[in-house]
Amino acid sequence: MILQPLLFPPVDYLLPQPGLEDTGAVPEFCTCGVELPPDARFCHKCGKPQREEVRLVEEETAPPALVEPRLPPPAVAPPPTIDFHNSLAVRVGFLAGSLAFMASSLPFPVVLRFFLLLGAGAFSVFLYRRRSGHPVEIRSGVKMGWITGLFCFVIFTVLFTISFVAMAYLTRDAGMIAVYRQQLGAMGMSPDKVQEALDLFKNPAQILLMLVSLFVTSTVIPAVGGALGARFFNKN
């Protein structure tokens, strides 16, 4: 039992140990004539290598693929604010206000003039949406309609001021007043309405009250129409 390990050495002893390699045949003499020690790697005189070195070839690993960073989506610019700094809103308001003034100047009933101003505000929103390509919210629709009504009032005020100055000059002559009555009568005004128009030019306080009332009517009604137009067109 004691001699068994000597007669039968362990199997692990016969297997090659890790880290040990076959160095190959090494000559006894170098080409320069010097005797080499056993297992010499280099000649100690001339430095010539005596055997090939086993080089471990490392597997080339591919570099990691570069992942392009995801750029954030481009920021969407908000639609421009509708005010007097917006040139497109000013042009649309002037056009719609001019059309509203010409339509309301015709001898239509009061109810029809109301709907004309309401439609002018909605039309301005439609035209602005089409020209700009931006949706119009209800609040912006109110502004667009208000700008339209303001231009309508300004056009009326300018023409009314010119008429007032001309009328103040004409009332000095009785003959010119008769001509003015005939012209207003030819336009379909009754004699009572003609007299009211003449009396209006003689009362500055009444003229001021009329302008204030006209300002409120000309701006509020188109603003409501602009809000209704913005709500209607946004649904579609």
Image (cartoon, helix red, strand yellow):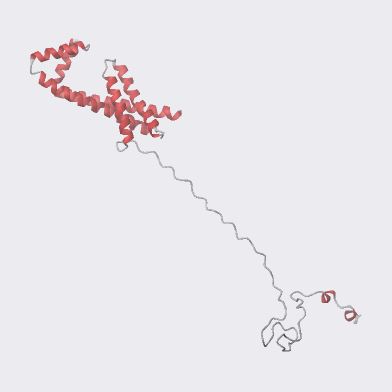
Q: Is residue 202 visible?
A: no
Q: Relative to 171, is 38 above or below?
A: below
Taking 62 as reference, is 29 left or right?
right
Residue 162 in the image: x percent, y percent? 17, 24
Give the residue at the far bottom of this rendering: 34
Q: Is residue 8 visible?
A: yes
Residue 231 in the image: x percent, y percent? 41, 29
Residue 153 in the image: x percent, y percent? 25, 26
Quadrant location, the N terminus: bottom right
How many badges with numbers are in the image?
0
The quarter of the picture where residue 124 lies is: top left
Q: Residue at x 29, y 29 (%)?
A: 94
Give the residue at the far left of this rendering: 173
- Along the line of sight, which residue is nearer the eye, 7 or 173? 173
Q: Residue at x 30, y 23 (%)?
A: 100
The quarter of the picture where residue 44 lies is: bottom right
Q: Relative to 15, is 126 above or below?
A: above
Q: Relative to 70, is 170 above or below?
A: above
Taking 88 as reference, is 234 left or right?
right
Q: Residue at x 33, y 31 (%)?
A: 144
Q: Relative to 152, is 68 above or below?
A: below
Residue 140 in the image: x percent, y percent? 36, 34
